[in-house]
Image (tube, rainbow, N blue to C red):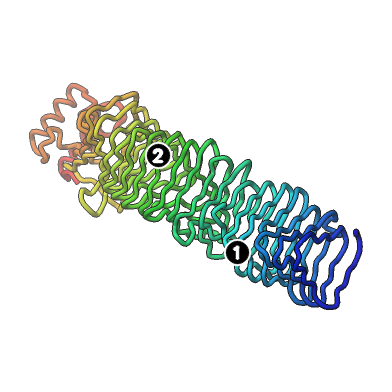
Amino acid sequence: APNSLLRVAGDITDSFGGDMFIGPGSTLSVHQGLNLGGNEPARLIFFGGDQNSPATLLSNSWIDFQPQDNRIEVLGHARINAPVPDLFADALIVADNSGLSFNGTVSNMGRADIRIGDNAFLEFNAGLSNNALSSIEINGGRFLANFFKNSDDGIRGHGLVDSGIRNDTFIAADGGTLIMDGRDVDNDWDGINDDGQLLALTGDLHLISNDDNLGVDYSGEIRVGNGHELFLDGIALLMNPGSSMQLFGGAVNTATTTVRFVGGHMEVFDDSSFGNSLLVWPDSTIILHADLHLEGNSNWFTHDATISGTGNTVVEQDAKLLLGAETTVESGIVNEGRVTLSNVVTVQEFDNHGALEFRLGRNNAPGHDRMIIEQSLRSFDGIFRVLLINNFEPAAGDSFDLLDFDQLIDNGYTLELPDIDPRLTWDTSDFETLGIIRVSCSPDLDSDGDVDADDFFLFLDGFASSNLDVCDLDNDGDCDADDFFAYLDLFDNGCP
């Protein structure tokens, strides 16, 4: 009955099954132990009560639920204030707005189907030291344990699972946001056989660690789609060889960490997005059947990575993509943000509305970045930006083959070039046709590599005709004595 107390001086052994009810505010206190069920099915039912007056079961020794086909049902708030050496329950069911707290250690838990309702909770506050593979269906509630291993029926639903995890089957968000707070323990998100699944197809899945940047090796399968997201907070996900990620119109986002493919495989079936940081390392593959939108500022496709398919890699505004040496992109890139090259990169097609950056001054061949475009530069109305690195100083006669392409579709691009020695000029006359820029010396007017009388007479002809392209060396809009003496100085000192 409600608000009652029953003390048993010895132990209780129920060998005949049936139901045991503990009402609101009531306590069943067993001095020794409780063995419920024996060889027959049994139910332990907590009903009524709230957090201030829960139904309570306690023992000075142990509580043992033996048969495989019994169940615990909670229709209110309840607590078990005793160690449970063996918890074999076919089901643990916590109804909406209810809760059950195990305040003693549960040493050995058999396979159980756990169902937690809306605004409900199931807590193992003193530890769950060894559980057989079990399942959790959570519908807006909370599950708390130090560690949990799931069964063939997985973990499914929406709510909070605050526990270390070994995912031997699947974790699936459904009907809302499922938050998996893995704490600081060594979580095994893909299970002992590397075939675990993370699914965000009918809900958003959030993986959280209190560690600021916990590296998680993953060899299982991830599927995200239908407008839902996989969100990582404090977890740096490493997609190992054999792993796969499939995107069906979903998003993968991180708070501050990265998703790094170190031999894994990703396939995009519907337009999807990546936030913060995507790293694709050697021997990894990405197949695009639709567009992959990069929204973060730390994306990197490294050498020997392969990106292919009919879709495009779209670098969104304010996003950044670094293309590493020998990267092969067998599909298109649409750049709305910033793409930086690292040595020689091959791309099928490139559509630029942002900034494409080349760096001159590498210590290894060819000494500068270069993009090979198999087809065409499409709709180029963005910026070509050339940068100097490693204190590199271009010299007269230097030539830089930045782009190889069949066709440049010029929609009003801007070419940004770095400052160089004032005696030198950038020659961009072959850029639109050959993708080449050169460095020339101002006194070397006939571009034959030396400064001699031929150059001097060309300057005099330009000076006499006020040809500003030849004689306006100080760039003040006229040809006068200042330009004449400036040319004499360059003539005497030669090219740098």
Percent across and percent down for residue 99 are: 76, 56
Q: Are marks 2 and 1 in contact (CB under 8 Å)?
A: no
The residue carrying pointer 1 sits among few (fewer than 14), some (14 to 19) or many (20 or more) residues within 10 Å by Cα, namely many
Most foreground residue, 425 or 2: 2
**Is there any visible trace of residue 278 in the rendered image?**
yes
**Is there any visible trace of residue 418 in the rendered image?**
no
Mark 1 secondary-structure assignment: strand
**Mark 1, residue position:** 147
Percent across and percent down for residue 372 are: 24, 38
In the image, is 423 to the left or to the right of 184?
left
**Mark 2, residue position:** 338
Percent across and percent down for residue 495 are: 17, 44
Nearer the viewer's eye, disc 2 or disc 1?
Answer: 1
Most foreground residue, 290 or 253: 290
Callout 1 amino acid: Phe
Q: How many marks?
A: 2
Mark 2 secondary-structure assignment: strand
Callout 2 amino acid: Arg
Query: Spatial distance from mark 2 to mark 1, Cα to Cα?
Result: 43 Å
Q: Residue at x 66, y 55 (%)?
A: 114
Percent across and percent down for residue 360 are: 27, 46
Q: Is tag 2's residue or tag 1's residue first in the polypeptide sequence?
A: 1
Residue lying farthest top? 465
Residue lying farthest left? 453
Q: Residue at x 67, y 59 (%)?
A: 69
